[in-house]
Image (cartoon, rainbow, N blue to C red):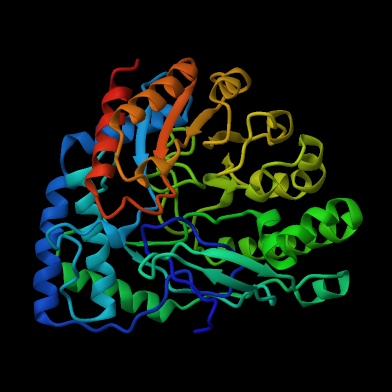
Amino acid sequence: MTDNMTTHAAFDAPGTAVSNDTVYEYRPVDYTQEDISIIRELGAQYMEYASLPIQKENARLWGKLNDLERTRPMVWHNEMPWHELNVEDELTLRTSSPFTQRIEEELRRRIYLWKHMPGDMVLEPVFYSPMIIENSGIGLNISEETASTDADNHIVGHKFIPVITCEEDLEQIVTPVVTLDREKTEQTRAAYEEIFGGVVPVEMKGVQGFWFAPIDDVVMYMGTNELLMNTVMDPDLIHASMKKITDAYMGALDQYEALGCLGSNSINSRIGSGAYGYSGQLGRGQMTGMKCSQMWGACASQFFTSVSPDMQEEFCLPYEKPWLERFGLSYYGCCERLDHKMDVIGQVKNLRKVSCSPWSDPAHMAEVLGRNYVVSLKPSSAVFAFDHFDEKAVVKDVTAKLEALKDCNVEIIIKDISTVKYDPSRLWRWVEIVTELCRGQI
């Protein structure tokens, strides 16, 4: 495993299509009878929750929202500081091997979320066994320095050291080679089924989408100040970089699709930086062998949050639009401000959801989106980081945003949570408060 290799747990956000990593890191099959007992006990508890009628009702409401039918705002959460959330050892792993610990961690986290902060979560009565897929990478590595304030927190600051300084550097970029290891995939699936012993149904799952943000990739290779300077001094280098990276993504996507490695994300799967993808328009779909046209696509351009709409159209849209329009529906944005750029991103024909970050103006977002899209509202998570958790401030903030967006289709997500000051009840209360506010809406 290389230093820049990452692992994506089966329930996390989609990975990149071109990074030098495994989509799901293969872990040698290794477990004891005690491991089996632990997981089956957790599995039985999980199925008790996943079989509740509210799960189907929540899934139905998410589908209505994503199909632009009138429904109340829906509440979700993601990107937790898990190292701060363990209460009474609920998240403490007890199995003995990396293979079983991945299963155990997923079960414990889902059970924890449902018990303490369900919001409008949906638990499906199934556990997915991953396809083991290797990706050879783009041929270019990120060079960076990082800084952290909490050794247990995976969130760190980044200083990118330029590795793209001229067009000759782009010759290093190649289309990744994507390989499905069928033997290890089947070995993993068989082990999952034996471990669960019928307590939880097991189904094989392919990749449910990719994080596509080519301008953010370019900044990691080119450097922050250098990229901004080059919008004026060397725009051709930015265009050449965007084209090379986009071509690599497209080539990788072709391979994932041809290998049958794509799974439906019209389910309780995160779409881009937003919430669930349930959609009657797309249909439930299969967990392997899907085509892009049957799935959600996603894109973001966070680093360009402060550039003009004209620059957005010049440097981003020509590369993002072809990617997004390969899919059935698409999601745009993350932490960047977008309410003033809808004339640009609205050119994407299949656009359905748009991120409304803490830096966007909800009133203007309501004006430009109306009910033609889903507004993916992200209140600031800074509320958790103060010495005192101010519940009244949460009510005031969210009430004002929901009022501004009262004539829109809204999902509200608390995410990017760096810290809760080691007090998980802050997060639980936020979800409880906001869920109550949303259920008071039409």
Please give the name of the residue rendered at 66% of the width and 50% of the height, measured from the top-left corner. Answer: 303
Query: Residue 105, percent across and down?
Result: 25, 65
- Residue 165 is drawn in which quadrant? bottom right
Viewer-nearest residue: 306 or 325: 306
Viewer-nearest residue: 401 or 253: 401
Q: Is residue 189 left or right of residue 7?
A: left
- Residue 382 is drawn in which quadrant? top left
Q: Is residue 146 left or right of residue 286?
A: right
Check the picture and name the quadrant holding the C terminus. top left
Q: Is residue 337 left or right of residue 379?
A: right
Q: Is residue 38 above or below residue 50?
A: below
Please give the name of the residue rendered at 70% of the width and 46% of the height, measured from the top-left corner. Answer: 304
Query: Residue 180, percent across and down?
Result: 50, 74
Query: Residue 377, percent across and down?
Result: 47, 33
Kindly tell me whether residue 396 is visible in this rendering.
yes
- Residue 359 is drawn in which quadrant? top right
Kindly tell me whether residue 125 is visible in this rendering.
no
Query: Residue 316, percent across and down?
Result: 75, 47
Please give the name of the residue rendered at 16% of the width and 57% of the height, measured from the top-left corner. Answer: 87
Q: Is residue 48 left or right of residue 218?
A: left
